[in-house]
Amino acid sequence: MLDQLLLDCKTAWIKAKVQKKHPFRYCTLVTVRPDGLPDARVVVLRDYDAQNERFTIYTDARTPKVEALRAQPNAMLLFYDARKLLQLRVEVHCTGMHQDRQKYKQQHPAAQKDYTTTLPPGTPIKGMDAVTYGEQDHFLVVEFAAKKIDFLRLMRPNHQRAVFQKSANQWEGQFIAP
Ligand SMILES: Cc1cc2nc3c(=O)[nH]c(=O)nc-3n(C[C@H](O)[C@H](O)[C@H](O)COP(=O)(O)O)c2cc1C
């Protein structure tokens, strides 16, 4: 049963890579700022490597999350499927950030543009339309390795909850009280 739950999670992430409407396509990335305060934001799950349990997102290299992850690589990815009342809290470790020309070029031109704002994201501007774009892009690929998964599915008569911890490249599962 525990093995099946873990397999279901992996299958869902594999599907989320290709199905644009999959509930796990959007997840919440939680990081810790250098001042110790938490930050959470929605990101798109761009890739999931089921062999190595690696999650990939894309971002602008100038965003505060990048600085936060450099200082504190431990983070969390939160997934929620409203139809199944399923929550997955995945403790992750940022394993690397790099530029990738090929992946950038694979983006739709409108999406490419998002990474080319003249001013870094978060800079005050005069109005919503006062956004300008330059030639240079700040596209960055960020990868995370999963360390622990907290699985919770609200059900009747009992909610299902289990944790999976990775040690020596093996997942160990344990049911816990919901
Ligand atoms: C639907 C949706 C999808 C988003 N996808 C991404 C994404 O894939 N990568 C990203 O960096 N920001 C994405 N954002 C913007 C982030 O939520 C966030 O506002 C931005 O990255 C700045 O984050 P930071 O200041 O905490 O670094 C998305 C926002 C929304 C509403």
Image (spheres, helix red, strand yellow):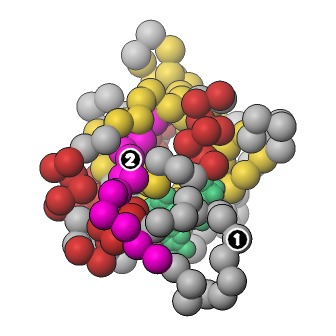
Q: Is residue 158 above or below residue 64?
A: below
Label 2 and label 1: CA atoms lie apart by 22 Å
Q: Is residue 97 magenta?
A: no
Element under disc 1 = loop
| Residue 178 seen | yes
Residue positioned 83% across, 44% down in the render: 37
* Horizontal relation, residue 137 to residue 68: left or right: left
Q: Nearer the viewer, residue 104 or 26?
A: 104
Q: Position of residue 104 (x, y in %)?
A: 24, 56
* Amino acid type, callout 2: Leu
* Horizontal relation, residue 109 to residue 5: left or right: left
- Disc on the earlier residue, 2 or 1: 1
* Horizontal relation, residue 47 to residue 4: left or right: left
Residue positioned 35% across, 36% down in the render: 98
Q: Choose mark 2 or mark 1, whichever is in front.
A: 1
Q: Is residue 129 above or below residue 58?
A: below
Element under disc 2 = strand
Q: Which residues are magenta?
A: 132-146
In this figure, which residue is indicated by the disc labeled 1?
124
Residue positioned 46% across, 77% down in the render: 132
Q: Position of residue 108 (x, y in %)?
A: 23, 72
Q: Position of residue 49 (x, y in %)?
A: 29, 39
Residue 140 circle label: 2
